[in-house]
Image (cartoon, coloured by chain):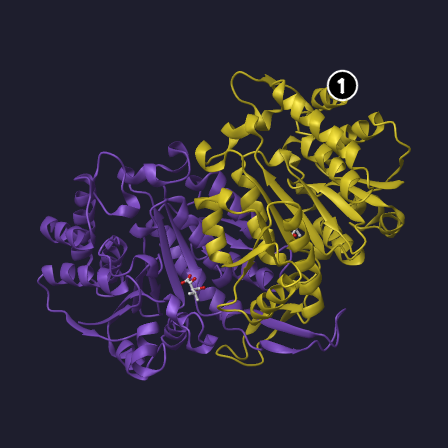
Chain colours: A yellow, B purple
Amino acid sequence: MKIAILPGDGIGPEIMNEAVRVLNALDENFEMEWADVGGAGYAAHGHPLPDSTLKLAKEADAILFGAVGDFKYDTLERSLRPEQAILGLRKNLKLFANLRPAILYPELAGASTLKPEVVSGLDLLIVRELTGDIYFGQPRGHRTAPDGPFKGAREGFDTMRYSEPEIRRIAHVGFQTAQKRNKRLTSVDKANVLETSQLWREIVIDVSKDYPDVKLDHMYVDNAAMQLVRAPKELDVILTGNIFGDILSDAAAMLTGSIGMLPSASLDENNKGLYEPSHGSAPDIAGKGIANPLAQILSAAMMLRYSLNMGEQADRIEKAVKKVLADGLRTGDIYEDGTKRVGTKEMGDAVVAAL
Amino acid sequence: MKIAILPGDGIGPEIMNEAVRVLNALDENFEMEWADVGGAGYAAHGHPLPDSTLKLAKEADAILFGAVGDFKYDTLERSLRPEQAILGLRKNLKLFANLRPAILYPELAGASTLKPEVVSGLDLLIVRELTGDIYFGQPRGHRTAPDGPFKGAREGFDTMRYSEPEIRRIAHVGFQTAQKRNKRLTSVDKANVLETSQLWREIVIDVSKDYPDVKLDHMYVDNAAMQLVRAPKELDVILTGNIFGDILSDAAAMLTGSIGMLPSASLDENNKGLYEPSHGSAPDIAGKGIANPLAQILSAAMMLRYSLNMGEQADRIEKAVKKVLADGLRTGDIYEDGTKRVGTKEMGDAVVAAL
Ligand SMILES: CC(C)[C@H](C(=O)O)[C@@H](O)C(=O)O
Ligand SMILES: CC(C)[C@H](C(=O)O)[C@@H](O)C(=O)O
């Protein structure tokens, strides 16, 4: 089993170290190969997604990704900015299915800005399409407006597009995910305004016929944003497109108040995938040894479950994380009175010990 | 002063009655003319925005709008659905500037799903562009994909577009609004991915030079959705495009837990405007006399201030609403132990009495 280890920038390398230690502690025969990505890729090879890194990612059975971005790369032109690495990996590896859990661990209920009764026990999953939509749709660019009320003016434009097979394959992921959970799926679109969403809804309804045991409902994206704040526990699996999923998954993650705990998976048709924390590279705290490594460690667990067919090892890691939380260990981001504040490495040590 | 009164569907007519009573109680010489819109427009004239209604809206100095939509119109084809009336009015009257306050009245702090310390005193304003973006951008439709990885498949597509003059005029509204408040403006885009957003950011920065007293910052839309949940009081005025504004303004409204209190304004270049509650038509409680009329009443106050140049009368209404809340009167949506539950009409009576 070959795993590409792409730590990236900011706190990426620190938290990746801990995840790798946890993987090593499992005593399996992983072949791990490291490569630069994001700002680190640019610094070493002049591109956020160097050819050698892309090649490794393609060869590997799974990719464990840290985080990218740092202040020092903020002035680069967009095509060289760290986040282009993420977009490039998604597109090149056809990672169309993004799974983003938003889980509130009972021990961390206090970290949420929402009232405990509204969020305690929260466990929702966003299934976001990741290689289509307005993220990649052509044509796009800057031009002189060819028509419309501002004809002749300078304009920026992008194309939102979804084709039937694209919607169909992500819908299947959504329904299959719902089948394994509580058999409820909420498809989010903006079908009252967008043509793309109308097709989305039509195809999702069509796919639903293959899953009579799953209860499907539809929500407009503005309403979904409201329901996430009003009553998030009424939602279970959300299925949505790339841009709406970007917004809603971050809102959902923040409901937990502990985004430092949340992993994510981005999968292709064969369940090969890229695994990364839902949080960013936090350059402001990089190198201080205080970052929370648990999202990275839980991303490794997700990788074992989804791409490497090692569900038991994934369970072991997740149980170890729960034990460490139950023991009261907390990095600064989730610290509360009465718990024990630890650094990145101590947290990693504790998870390894709990294994 | 001619006011078009468009009550619409669901609870629209009930809450509009109370707003009109409040306006009448001011003892000014308003000429009010009523017309059907939304489902009511379709039922009476076969179209959600009948010609006669559009004509009236154009002639009037301001439009007071209720809410549209009802279960019975859900099966109509999209071009006849109630919400087309809103889109049609925005487009035909060039109502490009949507102002959506999210204010949490101290008396209602308990209604929020967020912890009191996170939201008490919340007072933020979203300035949303309303006539451009992917809402109206051509081309759009369903077709056979002309190119891309799913060439030949059926696809739905829409165009996100913003031209320089469109961005410029809404940016001016944003900065001027910020000048009247706390001189802080947060522009929200997705410039790390979208071409449209890149132009948006460039023009907003250019316009900022006219407002050296306003502190401008930029946030990606996914981060904005997170910050609304994490620390909404750190935001003051948010400037954004049509689709992001749709999503964020609903999330922001829901933070208050009392969306039945929130008015909104949609203005053209000359401050002629359409005023409507931020909530919907709530067909499930229509006709029961229990809907909260305060958002509609506060919409009338906004109308007086922005379009009819009657700031003092607007103040009077807003003070009356505050007094009624301080007196403990609550409709069901904002009811808490220890307050007095009243119906739509009693709430209207109380506001009129407090004037
Ligand atoms: C970095 C950015 C391009 C990316 C996205 O918008 O998809 C990020 O926000 C995410 O959600 O993974
Ligand atoms: C009804 C719908 C078309 C509308 C919109 O998307 O703008 C509504 O959600 C709003 O925000 O006023």
- Viewer-side residue, B164 vs A319: A319
Up-down relation of residue B16 to residue A254 (above or below): below
Q: From the top left corner, tell me how far across and down residue A287 is, in percent.
A: 71, 28
Secondary structure beneath label 1: helix
Q: Quadrant of the C terminus of chain A?
A: top right
Q: Is residue B173 left or right of residue A346?
A: left
Residue at the location (46% across, 38% down)?
B231
| Residue B70 visible (yes or no) | yes
Instruction: List the residue tagged with mark 1.
Output: A353
The quarter of the image holding the N terminus of chain A is top right
A213 versus B134 height, above or below: above
Q: State the residue at coordinates (81%, 27%).
A: A21
Query: What is the chain identity of the residue bearing mark 1?
Result: A
Could you tell me residue A117's position as x and y percent? 44, 34
Q: Position of residue B91 (x, y in %)?
A: 41, 74
Q: Is residue B249 above or below residue A206?
A: above
**Residue flagged by tag 1: what amino acid is it?**
Ala
Residue found 49% across the figure and 53% down from its top: A224
x and y, in percent, of residue A111 in the image: 52, 30
Q: Is residue B275 left or right of A151 when viewed as pictured?
A: left
The answer to whether B134 appears left or right of B154 in the picture is left
Q: Is residue A33 left or right of residue A77?
A: right
